[in-house]
Image: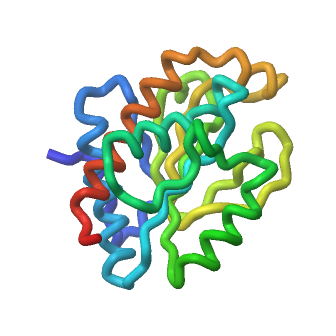
Amino acid sequence: MLTNLFDFTKSAKEIKFSIHQPNTTYEMAMNIRCMIQEAAALNQEVIVLCIGTDRSTGDSLGPLTGTKLKSINLYPHIFGTLDDPVHATNLPNMLTFIHSSFANPFIIAVDACLGKLENVGFVSLGHGSLKPGAAVNKNLPAVGDVYITGIVNVSGFMEHLVLQSTRLNLVMRMSETIAHSLSFALSKIAK
């Protein structure tokens, strides 16, 4: 039984999933699927935009997720991989490209974030946009209709160093969980 299924009548803003729980992938997928079905009903094209860089372990969650998702799912609208990352310097151009290429895009934004110690290892799924680069004081545009963020390390002090020293194992596990959840959710929508 799903314990965290979004209740759209109550306008749930965000739910969190621990990557250490056995049903996380399935529960995330079902919640993402609910969100995607709303977009499909409005004839919106679903875009997965994975943000980050492979030059920082902590910030590689997005490109790792995009790469894994492309390898397990044939969904055509996935942007941000290890081969072609979407990061601070090219994010505005990528958003321009998406909005000029798709008449009515519904963007699922995936990014790493820093948070409280007790939340490290959790993935947040929510309605609305995320603000990439906020942890390292970058002024980037807000992105997404829905966001998925993985809390990869602790915030509060020397964020650049914290992102550089984040454990790769944690980031890999999070990217696997997110990619498999997205793959399952995307496979259930009409293409």
Give the residue at the far left of this rendering. Answer: 1
* Count of all numbered marks drawn on residues in the image: 0
Which of the image's four quarters has the C terminus?
Answer: bottom left
Above or below, 136 against 21 in this view is below
Residue 13 visible in the picture = no
Tell me which corner region of the image, top left, top right, bottom left or bottom right, holds residue 180: top left
Q: Position of residue 184 (x, y in %)?
A: 26, 49
Q: Position of residue 173 (x, y in %)?
A: 42, 25
Above or below, 38 against 54 in this view is below
Residue at (32%, 48%) from the top-left corner? 73
Residue at (46%, 61%) from the top-left corner? 77
Residue 131 visible in the picture = yes
Q: Position of residue 86 (x, y in %)?
A: 66, 49
Residue at (35%, 69%) from the top-left corner? 8
Residue 41 vs residue 121, the one in the foreground: 41
Residue at (46%, 50%) from the top-left corner? 125
Judge left or right: residue 51 versus residue 172. right
Which of the image's four quarters has the N terminus?
Answer: top left
Q: Position of residue 89 (x, y in %)?
A: 81, 50
Judge left or right: residue 13 versus residue 26. right
Q: Tell me, what colour scheme is on the image? A: rainbow
Judge left or right: residue 137 versus residue 72. right
Above or below, 191 against 82 in this view is below
Tell me which corner region of the image, top left, top right, bottom left or bottom right, holds residue 63: top right
Judge left or right: residue 41 versus residue 144. left
